[in-house]
C-alpha cells in the first residue's frame, strides 16, 4: 500500500550533492573547494573529477548569466530577463550533454507555503521560455525553494530584489 | 351592569394569573438542599472513569499503542472515594501548622486587602452600608475599558464601542431591576411594603461586580447563573446555593463560572444592604449574567 | 354618579389588595442582576506535593513547579509565591485550614502527595480546593511510572484548568517544529519535537535534507511534513512510534502545505506543477487522490473545518493573496478576507468559531483571528515577520514563529516560537535549544 523509504541511508550521498549545487547557486565563490571531498577510493576520485568538469561548466554558465530577477509577488519575465535567457538558451544548446535544473526563489516577505508555489511559478516561467527557444523539456527540471535559500541576507529592498530569482544550474 | 361583570371577570382572571404565577415563585423559596461537598465528591469518581471511557472510544482502530518514544506508561486510575471532609468546616483549625516566620508578611497583606470572612453574627452588629473604595478598582476599570480582547489595530474604536454598549446595558439593567421590583404590571408598588430604590440595588450590584472574576471560558455559558443567597442583617453572607443544581453537575462551563460567582458573593461579604431594608435581603437571588464577555 | 364612585372605591380596594398580594410575592423573590465582572487571572496557590509520610520531596516540589508554570502561562491564573505561604504543604486527604490561605488573596489551593508503590510505580494524588467557598472541587489519584512525573504534572494541570475555567486544558500536549541553525543562506533545518512547555526536546531528522511545515495528526502519533529528500520536495508522513518516514503518493510535481483532516484519514495539500498550484486531498486508507481546485492561480495552505465539511485556503486568484472558503468537494468558492493587505495561512480553530491567519500589510506581518465568514478581525501579534499560527487543542492559545529583522551585515537574525492567548494580551516566547519555526500543536495525548 504505502511506499516506505529509508531516508537516512542515502543521506551522505545527498549531502555531497547538495553542497556542490549550493556553491553554484550562490555563485559568489567561484573557487572550487572540491578538495574537501578528499578522495580515498577510486570511485570517489572519479566523482571528484566529474565534479570538477561540472564546476567548469557551471562557472561558464554563471559568466553567461545564470539568474533572472522578478518583481515582488510576480513570476513574469521582463525584457531584460528574456535577453538573458536568450543567451542562456544558447549555452544550454552548446552543452547538449548536460541537464539543468531551474531553481525558483522568493524574498522573505511572504508566507512560506505561498512562496513555495511562487518559486515554482518563477522556475516554470524560465523553463517554459527556454523550451520555446528550442531546448528539450526533458533536459530541464524545476524546483522551488520558496524563501528557504536567500542569495543575499538583509532586511532591505536591495536584498529582497536579489532574492526574487530563478537560477539555472547544472543537474 | 355589563361594565361591572366585565370588571369582575377581569379581576377573576387577574387572580387566576397571580395564583398561577405565584406558585412557582414561592417554590423558589423552598430551600433546595445542596450539600456542595457531596456533589463534588461524586463527580470525582465518575469524572475519572468517564474520561477513560471517552479516550478509549476516541482511539481509532488504526492507532496502535501509546507513544513508544515516551518511555513511561500512564494510567489514570479512578481514586477511591476521597476521605469525606468534615461537614463543619468553618471552625476547623490546625493552629500548630502555622509558620511564625511568615506572620509579618501576612499581616501586611491583610492590611492591604480587608479580610471578608464569613461570620455568623445575628444581631449585634449595625448594618454596614458603605463600601470601601479600593485601589484595585481603578486597574480593573481600565481593564474593562480596554476590553478583554486585545487587537493591535482597532483597540481605540472598540473600547469606545464597549463603553457605549455598556451604557446601554446598564440602562437596560436598571429597567430590568425596576421591573423586578415592581413586578410585571405597570402599576406602582404598594406603599406599605419596604421599597428598594434603584440606588439600593445599584450599590449592591456595583459592589459584587468588583469581586466577580471569570475566566474567558465563561463566554461559553449561554444562560444566567442564579445563586440563592442568605444574609444576616449586617450584610454578611450566610450561605450561597446554586439554583440550577443539575446544570451545575452537567455543564463544565456552567460549573466553573458558578463557582466563580459563588466566590464573588463570599468575597463581597458583607454586602452593602440599604439601611432599614435589611429584612428584604434575608433570602434573595443573584443572577450572574456572563454575556458581558461577548459584548467586549 | 354615586353608584359609579362607590364601585370605583371597591375597585380601588381590590386593586390595592391585588398589588399588595403580588408585591409581597415579588418581595420574597428579590433578584439582583450582576451583569459585569473581571476577566482577571485567578490567584492560586500550589503547595509542594508531599512525599512519604507527609515529608517534603524533591519530585513533589518539581511537580508543583510544573503545574504552576503551566497554569500561569495560560494567562488565566496568577500563582502566589510559595514563600508567602503560612501553612506547610498538607496531604490532599487533609482538609486545609482555609483561613491560612484566604488572607493571601488566594482563591484556589492545590494540595498533593506522592507515594512509592514499588521501584517503578508511583502514586500521585491531588486535590483542588476552593478557598473562598471552603470546599473541594476535584481530586484525582494517578498511578504512573516514576519517570513520568512530568507528564502527570501536565495531566493534573489540565484537570485544574478545566475545573476552574470550564475549558479543556492543553498542557498534556507536544509541539513539533523546525529547529533551525546556521547562517540564513545556508540554514540547517531539522524536524524536532518537545513537550508543550519546551521540555523533553528531541530531534527527529538529522538536517541532511531540508524539512518544512510539520503538522500533527489529530488522531494518531503521526506528523505530516514537507521534505526535500533527494532534492525532490514532497509530502511525507513521520510515524512517531516507529520513527519511519513514508512518502505520500507519487505526484508529477512538488507536493507541499499538508494538513490532516479532522478525522485523520485524509491529507489535504497543494500540488505545484507547470506553474499552477492547486489543492488536492489524498485518502490514507485507499490512496485515492481528489482534486479540489482547478485554477491557474496559486491555491495553497488549505485547512479543514473541524466538522470536515469546509476548507479554507489562500489564493491569489483575485490578484492578491487572500483567504477563501469552499465546500470539501471544491464547490462554492467564496472569498472571506476583505481587509487591507494580504492574507495567508488560514487555520481553523478546534471549536470552529474562529480562523487564525497571517496578514501582511505595509512591510509588517501580523497574526490575527476572525470569524469563518471573515467578520470580526482581530490582530494579536505583529513583527518584522510573524507567520504560521497553530491552535492549542482547546482553541484558547495560538503558537507561531517570529523572525527578527535580519541585520544588513549578513548576520543571521533569530527566529523563535511564541505563543499568545486569544484575548491577545500575553505573548510569551517558547525557549528552544536553537532557533525554531513552523510550530504545530499536537492534540491532547492519549493516556
Image (tube, coloured by chain):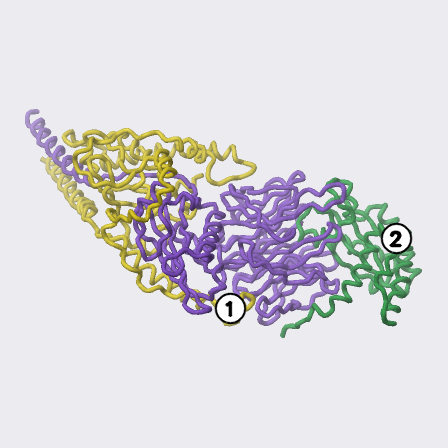
The answer to which quarter of the image holds residue C282 is bottom right
Query: Relative to residue C135, is residue A7 drawn left or right?
Result: right
Q: Residue furthest right?
A: A94
In the rendered image, which residue does mark 2 sit on? Answer: A30
- In the figure, the shade used to draw chain B is yellow
Query: Relative to residue B156, is residue B134 drawn left or right?
Result: left
Q: Residue at x 65, y 51 (%)?
A: C435
- In the figure, the shade used to draw chain C is purple
Name the spot of residue B65 as percent of width and height, x first. Answer: 51, 71
Depicted C3 relative to depicted C294: above or below: above
Do the residues indicated by labels 2 and 1 lie within the same chain of the protein? no
Q: Residue at x 71, y 59 (%)?
A: C210
Residue nearest the observer in this picture, C103 or A60: C103
Q: Residue furthest top?
A: C1
Name the spot of residue C266 as percent of width and height, x first. Answer: 57, 65
Say which element carries label 2. Answer: loop
Depicted C4 relative to depicted C118: above or below: above
Amino acid at each position: 500500500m504505502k511506499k516506505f523509504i529509508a531516508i537516512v541511508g542515502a543521506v551522505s550521498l545527498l549531502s555531497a550533492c547538495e553542497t556542490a549545487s549550493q556553491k553554484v547557486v550562490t555563485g559568489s565563490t567561484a573557487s572550487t573547494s572540491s578538495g574537501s571531498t578528499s578522495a580515498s577510493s577510486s570511485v570517489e576520485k572519479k566523482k571528484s573529477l566529474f565534479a570538477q568538469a561540472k564546476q567548469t561548466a557551471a562557472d561558464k554558465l554563471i559568466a553567461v548569466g545564470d539568474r533572472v530577477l522578478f518583481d515582488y509577488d510576480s513570476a513574469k519575465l521582463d525584457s531584460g530577463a528574456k535577453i538573458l535567457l536568450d543567451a542562456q538558451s544558447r549555452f544550454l544548446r552548446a552543452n547538449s550533454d548536460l541537464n539543468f535544473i531551474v531553481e525558483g526563489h522568493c524574498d522573505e516577505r511572504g508566507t512560506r507555503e505561498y512562496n513555495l508555489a511562487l518559486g515554482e511559478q518563477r522556475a516554470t516561467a524560465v523553463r517554459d521560455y527556454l523550451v520555446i527557444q528550442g531546448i528539450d523539456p526533458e533536459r530541464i527540471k524545476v524546483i522551488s525553494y520558496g524563501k528557504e535559500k536567500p542569495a543575499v541576507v538583509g532586511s532591505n529592498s536591495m536584498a529582497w530584489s536579489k532574492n526574487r530569482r530563478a537560477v539555472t544550474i547544472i543537474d | 351592569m355589563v361594565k361591572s361583570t366585565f370588571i369582575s371577570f377581569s379581576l377573576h382572571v387577574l387572580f387566576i394569573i397571580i395564583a398561577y404565577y405565584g406558585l412557582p415563585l414561592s417554590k423558589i423559596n423552598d430551600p433546595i438542599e445542596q450539600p456542595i461537598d457531596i456533589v463534588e465528591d461524586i463527580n470525582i469518581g465518575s469524572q475519572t472513569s468517564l474520561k477513560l471511557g471517552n479516550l478509549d472510544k476516541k482511539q481509532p482502530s488504526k492507532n496502535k499503542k501509546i507513544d513508544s518514544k515516551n518511555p513511561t506508561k500512564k494510567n489514570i486510575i479512578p481514586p477511591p472515594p476521597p476521605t469525606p471532609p468534615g461537614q463543619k468546616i468553618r471552625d476547623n483549625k490546625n493552629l500548630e501548622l502555622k509558620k511564625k516566620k511568615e506572620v509579618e508578611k501576612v499581616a501586611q497583606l491583610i492590611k492591604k486587602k480587608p479580610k471578608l470572612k464569613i461570620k455568623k453574627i445575628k444581631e449585634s452588629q449595625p448594618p454596614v452600608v458603605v463600601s470601601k473604595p479600593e485601589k484595585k478598582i481603578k486597574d480593573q476599570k481600565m481593564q474593562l475599558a480596554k476590553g478583554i480582547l486585545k487587537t493591535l489595530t482597532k483597540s481605540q474604536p472598540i473600547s469606545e464601542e464597549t463603553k457605549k454598549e455598556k451604557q446601554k446595558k446598564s440602562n437596560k439593567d436598571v429597567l430590568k431591576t425596576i421591573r423586578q421590583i415592581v413586578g410585571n404590571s405597570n402599576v406602582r408598588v404598594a406603599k406599605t411594603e419596604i421599597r428598594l430604590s434603584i440606588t439600593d440595588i445599584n450599590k449592591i450590584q456595583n459592589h459584587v461586580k468588583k469581586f466577580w472574576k471569570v475566566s474567558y471560558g465563561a463566554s461559553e455559558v449561554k444562560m444566567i447563573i442564579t445563586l440563592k443567597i442568605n444574609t444576616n442583617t449586617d450584610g454578611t453572607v450566610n450561605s450561597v446555593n446554586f439554583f440550577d443544581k443539575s446544570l451545575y453537575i452537567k455543564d463544565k462551563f456552567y460549573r466553573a463560572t458558578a463557582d466563580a460567582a459563588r466566590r464573588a458573593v463570599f468575597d463581597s461579604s458583607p454586602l452593602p444592604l440599604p439601611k432599614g431594608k435589611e429584612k428584604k435581603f434575608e433570602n434573595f437571588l443573584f443572577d450572574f449574567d456572563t454575556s458581558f464577555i461577548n459584548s467586549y | 354618579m354615586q353608584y359609579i364612585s362607590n364601585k370605583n372605591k371597591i375597585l380601588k380596594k381590590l386593586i390595592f389588595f391585588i398589588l399588595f398580594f403580588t408585591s409581597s410575592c415579588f418581595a420574597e423573590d428579590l433578584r439582583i442582576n450582576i451583569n459585569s465582572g473581571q476577566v482577571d487571572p485567578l490567584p492560586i496557590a500550589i503547595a509542594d506535593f508531599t512525599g512519604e509520610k507527609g515529608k517534603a520531596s524533591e519530585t513533589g516540589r518539581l511537580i508543583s513547579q510544573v503545574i504552576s508554570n503551566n497554569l500561569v502561562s495560560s494567562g488565566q491564573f496568577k500563582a502566589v509565591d510559595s514563600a508567602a505561604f503560612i501553612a506547610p504543604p498538607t496531604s490532599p486527604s487533609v482538609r486545609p485550614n482555609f483561613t491560612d490561605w484566604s488572607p493571601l488573596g488566594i482563591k484556589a489551593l492545590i494540595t498533593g502527595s506522592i507515594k512509592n508503590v514499588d521501584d517503578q510505580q508511583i502514586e500521585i494524588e491531588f486535590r483542588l480546593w476552593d478557598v473562598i467557598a471552603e470546599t473541594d472541587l476535584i481530586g484525582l489519584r494517578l498511578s504512573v511510572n516514576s519517570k513520568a512525573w512530568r507528564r502527570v504534572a501536565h495531566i493534573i494541570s489540565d484537570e485544574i484548568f478545566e475545573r476552574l475555567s470550564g475549558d479543556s486544558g492543553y498542557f498534556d500536549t507536544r509541539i513539533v517544529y523546525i529547529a533551525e541553525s546556521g547562517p540564513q543562506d545556508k540554514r540547517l533545518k531539522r524536524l524536532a519535537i518537545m513537550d508543550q512547555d519546551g521540555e523533553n526536546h528531541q530531534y527527529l531528522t538529522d538536517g541532511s535534507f531540508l524539512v518544512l511545515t510539520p503538522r500533527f495528526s489529530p488522531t494518531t502519533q503521526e506528523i505530516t511534513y514537507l521534505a526535500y529528500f533527494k532534492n525532490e520536495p514532497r509530502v511525507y508522513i513521520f510515524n512517531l512510534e516507529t520513527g519511519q518516514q513514508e512518502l505520500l503518493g507519487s505526484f508529477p510535481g512538488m507536493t507541499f502545505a499538508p494538513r490532516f483532516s479532522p478525522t485523520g484519514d485524509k491529507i489535504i495539500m497543494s500540488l505545484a506543477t507547470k506553474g499552477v498550484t492547486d489543492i488536492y486531498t489524498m485518502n490514507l486508507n485507499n490512496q485515492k487522490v481528489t482534486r479540489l481546485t482547478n485554477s491557474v492561480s496559486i491555491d495553497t495552505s488549505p485547512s479543514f473545518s473541524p466538522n470536515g465539511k469546509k476548507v479554507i485556503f489562500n489564493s491569489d486568484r483575485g490578484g492578491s493573496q487572500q483567504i477563501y472558503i469552499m465546500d470539501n468537494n471544491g464547490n462554492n468558492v467564496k472569498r472571506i478576507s476583505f481587509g487591507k493587505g494580504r492574507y495567508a495561512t488560514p487555520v481553523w480553530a478546534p471549536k470552529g468559531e474562529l480562523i487564525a491567519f497571517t496578514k501582511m500589510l505595509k512591510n509588517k506581518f501580523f497574526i490575527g483571528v476572525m470569524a469563518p465568514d471573515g467578520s470580526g478581525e482581530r490582530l494579536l501579534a505583529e513583527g518584522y515577520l510573524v507567520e504560521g499560527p497553530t491552535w492549542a487543542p482547546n482553541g484558547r492559545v495560538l503558537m507561531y514563529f517570529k523572525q527578527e529583522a535580519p541585520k544588513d551585515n549578513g548576520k543571521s537574525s533569530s527566529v523563535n516560537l511564541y505563543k499568545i492567548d486569544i484575548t491577545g494580551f500575553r505573548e510569551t516566547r517558547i525557549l528552544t535549544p536553537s532557533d525554531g519555526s513552523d510550530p504545530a500543536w499536537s492534540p491532547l495525548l492519549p493516556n
